[in-house]
Each structure stands twice: as C-alpha cells, then as structure tokens.
Image (cartoon, rainbow, N blue to C red):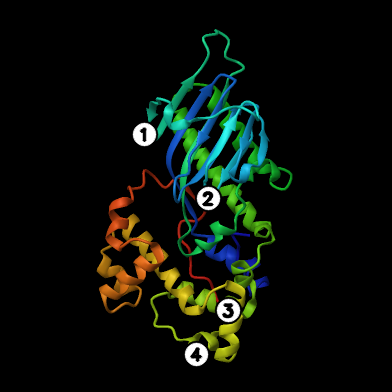
Amino acid sequence: MLDRNAENSSLHPNPDLVSDLLMGMRLYGMEYNRTQISPPFGLRFPTIEGRAQFHFVGRGPVFLRGPGDALHALDTGDAVLLPRGGEHSLLSDAEMKCHCITQFQPKTLCRNVNEIMACSNEKDHTSDALIFSGCMEFDLGSMHPLVALMPDVMLVNTLLKRYPEILPILDAMEREAKEDRAGFAGILARLADVVSAFIVRAWVECGCGGSSGWVAALRDPRLGRVIAALHRDPGRNWTVAELACQMGSSRSVFADRFQAVTGMTPVRYLTELRMRLAAQWISREGMAIETAAQRLGYGSQAAFSRAFKRVIGKPPGAVRTLTSPRPHAAATVHEAAPAPQTP
C-alpha cells in the first residue's frame, strides 16, 4: 500500500520500498483536449517524447490501436493510460484511415484545455464520440525506472473489481464530458489526472505486473537496503565497499548481485540516479547548474556536465531551455516523499 498508518508500520518493519519511494509521485497535466467527432473517424496521436497519454471515453464505442498495433475496444466510461505515450490511434472502426490530431483546429476552453469539434451536418449528434484526452508528464523523481516496466496500455476497466471506489470518479467524468456546465473543462482536467495517478498506484499495489529486475532489487531485503541508501543520499561519495557493507556482503558478491538484478553496475546506477534528479531540479525548479552539481557531490561543474550529457543526451543548459514550465501539478499521490527507512 502507498499509505501506511503507524499500526501497520509496526507490524511490517521491512516495508515495500517500491511503495515507499512512490509516495512522492506526481502527474503534471500539460495539455488536454475534449473531442467531439462524428463517425466514421480515425485520430492518430503522434509520439511526444517523455510524455504519457490519457484518454477517457465520454461517449463510445471507440477502438484504441496502441503501440505495437494491439487493438483495444473502449466503451462509454472507459479510461486508458499510455505511460510512455507512443504513437497510437482512436478509431470508430478498426480499419479506419487515420488523420493526425494536430491537423484539427482546436478552440480554447480554458487554460491548457482545448476543444475539437469535427461533427457531421446532421442535427442529431447523439451518435458522436466524446473523448477527453490528456498529455501528461510523470514526476517520479528517483523512481524513473518504474515507467519502463509499465505496460504500453493500462486500462482502468481491469481495475474495477478490485477497486470499485474509482467508479464514482469515472461517472463524474462522463457527466462532465457530456454536459457543458460551468467550469467543466477544468474539472475534467483534474479528474483525468486523479484517474491516471490511481491507475499507476493500483498497478504498483498489484505487484507491478510481476516485474523483475529493478523492482526485484527493491524488494530484496539486503539489496533493497543499498538502493534505499542511494536514493536517500545520492550526493554522498559512495564507494563499492560502503555499499557492500550496507548489504552485509563482500565487495565482489555485492557487485555481482547488484549487476545481475539491476542490469548495471552500482556506479552506473548512482550516476543515472543523480543525473535524472539533476534534470528535474534544473528544468522544473530552475536550480542553478552549479548548485545541482554541488548537491550531487560533484566538485567540478565540468565533470558534472560531462556526466549529465552522457546520461541525459544533452548538456544541462539545454534541459533548462527546452523544458516548458508546469501549468499545474494536478494530481499528487503524496505531497512529499519521506526518506524510506532501511530495514
């Protein structure tokens, strides 16, 4: 579970580090579209690097052709999250030809929410599809590797039996999508972020889809202590000997075990963790590059910049200029991520 009370914590002295580290998860909604379109139609959504995509069907049916060409049938009240985005399509029929969503001229409803109307000339539009879409960015902090483990398509209808409490939220989204009530666009945007966060949390609570590798490392009692220590204090000048001591093993046993489970050496893992954190601090918080370098244990800004470019693919200054400011932080599972306790 993501939220534990004191009684549960005392009963479980070795908490699930995946859940503990995920407590700081946030989803930032970047842009939303409410689309009303008459069948037949095919809408293609291009890949937007580093962005998740969310769709809610206010009136269906609609087919989703996801990354990898898999086809999913969606009906009224269904929601879907594509955590890594990727090119995908929404269609009235599985064989429809698609037009890119960027070809349509949207009308602004409110800040960050647009409307696309592509309706026939008929007076009765009850057969039109209504779709509310969101382009989002995860702020998972040091949990970034979790995104790579998620499935391409995460359907909310697979969660309803286990989490019936999400149904009222979906019902509210359906009402807001169909009725042009005051403030409906902003309410839909916030509800979309909440549902997306709920989907991710439910996936974690259900065991991350049986993922191994990095998740298995966090759940390994001995190796988990090491990873928790790295995430808690990434700026410390860690040595392999110190990390092996955290695990309670020799350096060679620790290094072999760490690489076998995570797929990388401890030094590489720490470097990637530091650079992901630095990218967020610089682009999202406006932190000075020199400050980020010092906080992460780099005495030389030049050495920091070289490591940053090697991991992120661009220099620190480019991250600041290429990243747009957040419109709002709409969905927050927990306001602050406390440092995970080592078992």
Choose mark 4 or mark 1, whichever is in front. 4
Instruction: Say left or right for 132 vs 165.
Output: left
Q: Residue at x 39, y 36 (%)?
A: 112
Is residue 122 among the parts visible in the rendering? yes
Relative vertical location of residue 254 with respect to residue 51 in this rendering, above or below = below
What type is the residue that disc 4 sits on? Answer: Ala
Give the number of the disc on residue 84: 2
Q: Nearer the viewer, mark 3 or mark 1?
A: 3
Residue at the image point whose x is 61% and y is 67% from the top: 215
Q: Nearer the viewer, mark 3 or mark 4?
A: 3
Against 18, residue 267 (above or below) is: below
Examine the rendering and report whether any part of residue 285 can be seen.
no
Residue at (45% x, 74% y) in the render = 270
Q: Residues within 10 Å of mark 1 (few under 14, many from 20)?
A: few
Label placed on residue 33: none
Q: Mark 4 or mark 2, which is nearer the start of the sequence? A: 2
Name the residue type under label 2.
Answer: Arg
Which tag, 3 or 2, sits closer to the chain's start? Answer: 2
The reply to whether the C-beta atoms of the residues labelled 3 and 4 are less than 8 Å apart is no
Task: Give the residue pinned by disc 3.
Answer: 258
Which residue is labeled 4 in the image? Answer: 241
Q: Give the residue pinned by disc 1.
A: 111
Q: Earlier in the sequence, mark 3 or mark 1?
A: 1
Kind of residue at disc 1? Arg
In three-dimensional space, the C-alpha distance between marks 2 and 1, rounded to whole angstroms, equals 24 Å
State which tag comes first along the sequence, 3 or 4: 4
Mark 4 surroundings within 10 Å by alpha-carbon count, few (fewer than 14), some (14 through 19), many (20 or more): some
* CA distance for labels 3 and 2: 26 Å
Residue occupying the far bottom of the picture:
250
Nearer the observer, 288 or 334: 288
Element under label 1? loop
